[in-house]
Amino acid sequence: MDGRAEAEISEESRLYVDGALVATFVIDADHPNVSAKVTTPAGRTEHSYALCGEITIRRPDGKTETHAVDSVGHLHNPDGRVFEALGANDFTDFYLADPNDPDAADHTRGKANACSVATS
């Protein structure tokens, strides 16, 4: 699940699990909450994830600011869980969390450089 924060104008983010794109979230004033059901391979209890994209916010002074969504982490025993996509540190750190079990996911704080696109 992902929801629009009070300061958020828009967001487009992609969720990768074990390197495969499993969901794309587009959030704006007309679509403040989105969710996707993701199925993980049977028999596995540990999965890597990456959140990639961009988020545009309105600062307290009224100016807009766009930040890269670029984070990685791990999901532990994700079957049957609901994870929320969250942002912290003035929209510079993004991660997944299960509000009912803080040990269900972890992440590397800050920008991970996992979402870079090669250009030529």
Image (cartoon, helix red, strand yellow):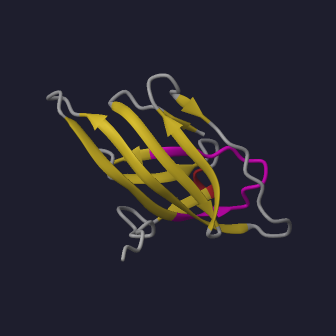
Tell me which residue sits at (85%, 69%) in the image. 43
**Residue 63 quadrant:** top left
The relative height of residue 93 versus residue 2 in the rendered view (above or below) is below
Q: Residue furthest bottom?
A: 120
Q: Look at the picture and state if 94 lies above or below 28.
A: below
Q: Position of residue 57 (x, y in %)?
A: 30, 36
Q: Name the spot of residue 47 as percent of width and height, x first.
A: 67, 67
Question: Which residue is drawn at the image coordinates 43% and 40% (left, top)?
Answer: 11
The residue lying furthest to the left in this view is 61
Q: Quadrant of the C terminus?
A: bottom left
Q: Nearer the viewer, residue 101 or 118?
A: 118
Question: In the figure, is residue 40 to the left or right of 27?
Answer: right
Residue found at the very far right of the displayed protein: 42
Q: Is residue 74 magenta?
A: yes
> Which x, y percent locates residue 90?
28, 44
Q: Residue at x 73, y 60 (%)?
A: 77
Asked if 68 appears above or below 17 in the picture, the reply is above
> What segment carries the magenta color?
73-86
In the image, 88 versus 41, the foreground residue is 41
Relative to 4, 63 lies left or right: left
Question: Residue 115, position in %: x, y?
Answer: 44, 66
Q: Residue at x 37, y 73 (%)?
A: 119
Report the side of 15 relative to 66 (left or right).
right
